[in-house]
Image: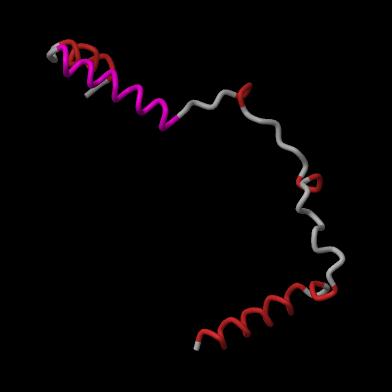
Amino acid sequence: MEMPNIAQEIATLPPEAQQQVVDFVAFLKTRYPVASPGNRPKRSKLSNEPFIGMWRERQDMSDSGAWVRELRQREWESAQ
């Protein structure tokens, strides 16, 4: 169905069905909002986020790869 024919097709429906089409379109608009460039929130720099560096002083996190490996090993052993 082509776009120009949609209005004609809707016009041939009974009034209650036309209202359902209107309601469905309203629902779709809430589900798929159109983002306009002016409405987007401004992004802050990631380095300014409060969680960056929160584990900076932890000695056990000096080698994060080793920490993850050790944590996984502990969790996997306790699951068996």
Decide whether residue 67 is among the magenta residues.
no
Quadrant of the image containing the N terminus = top left
Please tell me whether residue 52 is drawn above or below residue 11 in the rendered image: below
Looking at this view, is 51 or 10 the one in front? 51
Residue at x 80%, y 63% (from the top left corner): 55
Q: Main secondary structure of the magenta part?
A: helix
| Figure label count | 0
Which segment did they paint magenta?
15-32
Which quadrant of the view contains residue 39? top right
Q: 44 left or right of 22? A: right
Q: 53 left or right of 25? A: right
Residue at x 57%, y 23% (from the top left corner): 36
The image position of residue 40, as x and y in percent, is 62, 28
The image position of residue 19, as x and y in percent, is 23, 16
Please tell me whether residue 29 is drawn above or below residue 79 in the rendered image: above
Q: 48 left or right of 42? A: right
The image position of residue 78, as x and y in percent, is 56, 86
Decide whether residue 27 is among the magenta residues.
yes
The image position of residue 35, as x and y in percent, is 54, 27
Which quadrant of the view contains residue 21? top left
